[in-house]
Amino acid sequence: MIEQNYSVLMSVYRKEKAEYLQKSIDSMLSQTVPPQDFVIVCDGLLGDELNQVLQKKSRSIRNVFR
């Protein structure tokens, strides 16, 4: 079987709903083949709810750029 590697690059903006960010991250991490790299770029300052989601997921995602 051919090894499949891919990376995920996601941006998050302060007006996005925290539940959608949570669902997006969970969806990517639960794929049959998990991503080799997962990068989230924060587009400006985020609200408390979005920051809480990123804090909870920080164990699974090594690269969060603010």
Image (cartoon, rainbow, N blue to C red):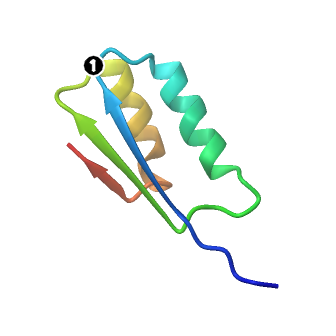
Query: Which residue type carries mark 1?
Result: Gly
Question: Looking at this rendering, what residue extends furthest in the bottom direction?
Answer: 1
Q: Look at mark 1 in the image and give the residue it sits on.
A: 47
Q: Is residue 62 left or right of residue 21?
A: left
At 77% across and 59% down in the image, what residue appears? 32
Percent x, y of residue 17: 44, 16
Residue 24 appears in which quarter of the rendering?
A: top right
Q: Is residue 47 above or below residue 34?
A: above
Looking at the rendered image, the quarter that the N terminus falls into is bottom right
At 71% across and 64% down in the image, what residue appears? 33
Looking at the rendered image, the quarter that the C terminus falls into is top left
Percent x, y of residue 3: 70, 81
Percent x, y of residue 20: 53, 23
At 53% across and 31% down in the image, what residue appears? 22
At 29% across and 44% down in the image, what residue appears? 41
Percent x, y of residue 52: 38, 29
Question: Looking at this rendering, what residue extends furthest in the right direction?
Answer: 1
Q: Is residue 36 above or below residue 49?
A: below
Q: Residues within 10 Å of mark 1 (few under 14, many from 20)?
A: some
SS class, disc 1: loop
